[in-house]
Amino acid sequence: MHRFKRSARVSDLLHSTIAEIVEEDLKDPRIGFVTITGVSVSDDLKNAQVYFSCLGSEEDKIRSEEGLNASTGYIKKLIGERTSLKYLPTIKFIFDRSIEKSLHIQELLNGVKDEKT
């Protein structure tokens, strides 16, 4: 028996493949400096949510998300060429706010620390 669910293995494969595609193959000017932070695949392997972070203003983040979502057909084509997956999931890009939240928490903790000293 396998130690991990198939969806977890597919998530890892998609994460590395999509990160490589975004870095090397996408030429859309709307897409800024984007980092793929995670991929979540449904248990039936039909849907994948791809989380990304992006440097820049809120407008840059929105444009990057639009550019990535507009490129999903091309990205799926490249995933099909580079992997041995029989079926490719529907891909949706979602901006990952966890980095912003962790920075905010760190600022709050630093403020508390400064008040104590």
Image (cartoon, rainbow, N blue to C red):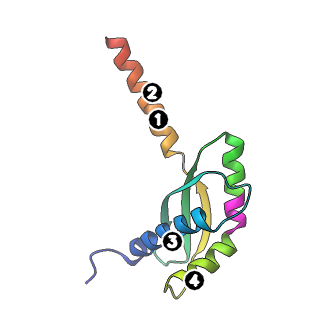
**Outermost residue toward the front?**
24
According to the picture, the residue beneath numbered tag 3 turns out to be: 17
Mark 3: amino acid: Thr
According to the picture, the residue beneath numbered tag 1 turns out to be: 103
Residue 25 location (% of width, % of height): 63, 68
Q: Can residue 87 be seen in this view?
A: yes
Q: How crowded is mark 2: few (under 14 residues within 10 Å), some or many (20 or more)?
A: few
Whole-angstrom CA distance, mark 4 to mark 1, is: 36 Å
Tell me whether circle 3 and circle 1 mark residues in contact (CB < 8 Å): no
Give the SS element for disc 3: helix
Residue 45 location (% of width, % of height): 50, 77
Give the numbered dot on residue 80: 4
Residue 105 location (% of width, % of height): 43, 32
Q: Say if 105 sits above or below 81 in the image.
A: above
Q: On the image, which quarter does residue 90 sit in?
A: bottom right
Q: Give the range drawn in magenta.
A: 67-71
Whole-angstrom CA distance, mark 2 to mark 1, is: 6 Å
Give the numbered dot on residue 93: none
Mark 4: amino acid: Gly
Q: Which residue is drawn at 37% across and 15% down?
A: 114
Q: Can residue 41 be seen in this view?
A: no
According to the picture, the residue beneath numbered tag 2 turns out to be: 107
Whole-angstrom CA distance, mark 3 to mark 1, is: 28 Å
Determine the main secondary structure of the stretch shown in magenta.
Answer: helix
Q: Nearer the viewer, mark 3 or mark 2?
A: 3
In magenta stretch: residue 81: no
Mark 2: amino acid: Glu
Q: Residues within 10 Å of mark 1 (few under 14, many from 20)?
A: few
Mark 1: amino acid: Leu
The mark nearer the N terminus, 3 or 1, is 3
Q: Nearer the viewer, mark 3 or mark 1?
A: 3
